[in-house]
Amino acid sequence: MTFKSKHLLWLLAALAATSLACNFAYSFIEDTTGISLGDDETREVTVPPVIEGPPDEIDTPAQAPDESDPSEPSADTEAAIPPEVRDQMDQIQDEVVLLRGLQPTGPVDRGLLSNEELREYVLEDFLADYTEDEAQDDARILALLGLLAEDYDLFNLYLDLYSENIAGFYDDEIEQMFVVQDSRFGGPERLTYAHEYAHALQDQTYDLDEGLGFNDDECEADSERCAALQALIEGDATLLEERWLLTYATDADFQQLLDFYDSFSSPTYESAPEFLKEDFLFPYITGREFVDYFFLDGGWAAVDALYENPPVSTEQILHPNRYPRDIPVPLVVPEILDELGDDWREIDRDVLGEWFTFLVLREHLTEERAAKAAEGWGGDYFIAFHNESSGDNALVMASIWDTVSEAHEFYGAFRDYADSRFGERTLSSTTRSAWESRRAWSSMDIAGDQTLWVLAPGAEIGERVRELIEFPAEQAD
């Protein structure tokens, strides 16, 4: 599920290699150098979010001239890089090629950006591609899901977050790679470069945009597939990054990484809601675990095979043993907006997926209970609505589960979730439950292997919406 505006698809895919590298670096450096960095109780580690940035949404400030050969690096961007840094970049590229086993088909344009240059560009690009109205709609959806307050300032969170935390990015649209640095090309920048060059090799080998369909249009049509594909791409690069650190990092790299982690501060990230931080990290941490599952069995050849038949759901990423056989069941999404009245508009329709179903449930259940209840996910759709006159919001979500038993397991878990979120039940049976308070009305139905959740500002509109929904939902072709 992509709760954010589709315009932010690539921006929101951007945070995590540093966080994982941080955990990896501490344990690895302790093991290989014998330097004690303290135990979990005595060592305070500020875990930074990913030092990587967006592949598509950021157009770099120094682009190659229109008439230049796209296979050749831009002289302007290359000339801006000190010769000793270019030599290091070339060496890291050779090392990544040896480790990953993908052969480059041509050079990659590259450059360095200062933090000031990055912030200026992120602000300009962000303001152009993601409006405050879109951010407000995203906050409405997250509020309906119980994850955010409706008035949460999501727009400025993103602005601050991406100007604070991006340390490198590869733009597959113009095939350029940038590392953000102010005064040096040290351990953190070298580690970032290894990760980003892995993306360049992925793009040259598999064509991320056209070949894999990792682009705005296709991700808008199927966000669950896009989330899985993103986890494959980032998990691959993150595993490569780890192995580069293990194989080629110098003593100076390790020391500079330790210094970086000890001094790193990310107030915006640290203040973000927990679910949002975990969602940022999902492609890198869980994606890396998914890729590693196949790498341990068959090396990089097994990872390459994943690109021939990419994963299609977060369920497959969370449970790699279910790949590729467990495919989501698409449901027919009803058209009910016209029946609701002129004041209502549809905010979005999308798929929540197993990962976000877990994040929603975990707000009011234990992590173990939420994971167990979400695990039987087989497919879903949701539609979110907003009333322009009253300011009210409404949500419909239909889910299909792998078995009838797992549908009942989710139904039971959701009732406990809703008891905690909405208060005492006004209706409770084996097939339907409802909750009503001054601010919200909610119901949950179960029929066979499907469930239906309706959330509305009151019983009248809630029951009306429920009557308009075909349930159980028809499976799409």
Image (cartoon, rainbow, N blue to C red):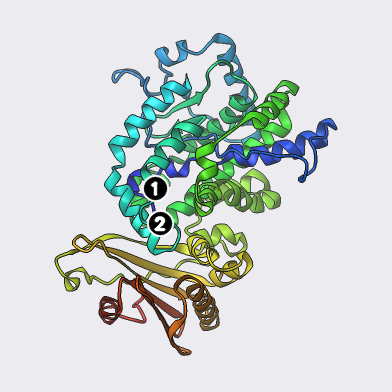
x then y, percent, for residue 80: 46, 12
Residue placed under numbered mark 1 in the picture:
213
Counting other residues with Cα less than 10 Å from the Cα at mark 1, is it few (<14), some (14-19), or many (20 or more)?
Answer: some
- Between 40 and 93, the one nearer to me in the picture: 40
Q: Which residue is mark 2?
A: 149
Q: Is residue 337 visible?
A: yes
Query: Compared with residue 409, is residue 175 higher up or lower down, i.e. above or below?
Result: above
Q: Is residue 277 left or right of residue 368?
A: left
Q: Position of residue 55 (x, y in %)?
A: 43, 36
Can I make out residue 54 in this image? no
- Look at label 2 and name its amino acid: Ala
| Mark 2 Cα shell of 10 Å, populated few (<14), some (14-19), many (≥20) | some
Residue drawn at point x = 63 percent, y = 36 percent = 241
Which secondary structure lies at badge 2?
Answer: loop
Mark 1 belongs to which amino acid? Answer: Gly
In the foreground, 360 or 112: 360
- Residue 342 image offset from top left, x and y in percent: 14, 66
